Image: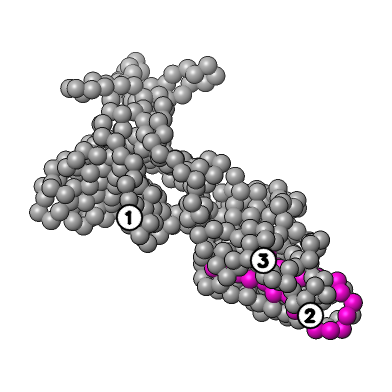
Amino acid sequence: MATRFWLTSSAAPYTPAAARGTWTDGTSTTAGLLGRQPVGASASVGMAETSATTTNVLLGRWISPPARKAGALSGTVAWITGRSQSSTASAMVVRAHMYVTAGDTGTVRGTLLSNYTGGTAFPTTAAGGGTGGTAITSVSVQIGDRIVVEFGYQAQNTSATSETGILYYGGTGTTDLVTGNTQVGSNPGWVEFSGADGLFTTPTAEIVDKFTTGISSRFVYWGNTFWNAAWHRVSCQANEQFPGLMAGDIGYEITGSTHYGEIVKIPTGGSNTTFSALILGPADNGTYARFKYVVPTGTLIFENAVNYYEENPPTVAYNATDHRWFRFREAAGTFYWETSNNASNWIVRRSITTPQWLKFGTLRTNFEGYADAGSNAAAAEVDNVNALPTTVVKVWTGSAWAQKPLKVWNGASWVAKPVKSWSETAWF
């Protein structure tokens, strides 16, 4: 997968003292956040030149959040930005320079793209334009490092007449800017690195917790949610406080990744009880994907909500065996809701073209229960988030019985596998 950043109009988190590209005019003070989601109103920056010789003019700089992991940033970079020139005589093409800072310092960790000069002139009517993928020089990124992207133009005219180049940034439209698109006042421009996976955000698949000894620091919880020490699970109550369990870091992404969990027990009781078995969204703004179980009707809903609502989402009748596991998955531009009885054989319950908000690297995920005030609703139980259960058996060591995981030969190695046990009416 690739990691996409957007040219936002939010303030830069840190701005290096000086531009690093080769600029004839590097006086532009425009600097913004190279964000993991579009943020801020649409804006533009224009700079004029009057030189009779080829001139390189900086328009602005965008700086990323700090890297979360160390690793090699390599591969290619692609981008689409909104741009325009004052006349065809301006003969302006894009100029770009990209590098990595050593943390919040002026030290260059390494240069990714050195003084790139494009070959297509800016339009006189503002529109999107950029590259489909240009090779970058590999840089060994360290935790806390930032990417800096410098954009400007090279004026290739030989006239002393004043000519102006303009770059557009910001905007939160529901579609990213593409080449030739004139919606530069709403559709955001972006920069995408093919080899930055996991460096600046964490894939949702890495939210792993088997709750063996408690609820780990990866999660926060509220509203009478607690660790069930007897069963090594999380008990998520259902009441008017919306008790829940949430991955505490708002900085995950699902692109090219998965996110699943075992719902050992669904709530029972209460006249208006629901349980959101798995929720994924960018913020508490009513935009999310979720598995929702409605207790009174026994219905499992696969929602893609905007403003807390979706009309007529797909549903099935809930089955405790068939729907013991829930999974979100994103692959090649498609987002899936899936269920399983064993975390191995998954059934697609719904799929959609991945919407823009699910491409953001600022997602958060949680489990949540609800019941009307005064309802006597039993709790849900959550286990094995992004982890397969380990079946534990006792083995005689010669002097005592010791707990050991059950392992099965898969043809190449011994791996831990679950087994099924009979529980009154069904195998689990």
Precedes in sequence: disc 2 or disc 1: 2
Q: In the displayed structure, does residue 382 sit left or right of residue 110? A: left
Residue bearing mark 2: 163
Q: Position of residue 305 (x, y in %)?
A: 36, 53
Q: Position of residue 93 (x, y in %)?
A: 79, 67
Mark yes or no: residue 336 visible. yes
Residue bearing mark 3: 127
Precedes in sequence: disc 3 or disc 2: 3
Query: Residue visible at 38% across and 36% down?
Result: 349
Label 3 to label 1, Cα distance in Å?
A: 34 Å
Q: In the displayed structure, does residue 229 sit left or right of residue 211? A: left
- Closest to the observer: 311 or 341? 311
Q: Taken as a whole, is the magenta stretch helix, strand or loop?
A: strand
Q: Residues within 10 Å of mark 2 (few under 14, many from 20)?
A: many
- Closest to the observer: 147 or 169? 169
Precedes in sequence: disc 3 or disc 1: 3
Residue bearing mark 1: 309
Label 3 to label 2, Cα distance in Å?
A: 18 Å
Mark yes or no: residue 147 visible. no
Query: Residue visible at 34% across and 41% down?
Result: 314
Label 2 to label 1, Cα distance in Å?
A: 49 Å
- Closest to the observer: 325 or 318? 318
- Secondary structure state at the residue bearing disc 1: loop
Q: What is the span of residues highlighted in magenta in the rendered image?
A: 148-171
| 37 in the magenta segment | no
Task: Work out whether 40 lies above or below 399.
Answer: below
Q: Position of residue 68 (x, y in %)?
A: 55, 55
**Callout 3–callout 2 Cβ contact below 8 Å:** no
Q: Residues within 10 Å of mark 3 (few under 14, many from 20)?
A: many
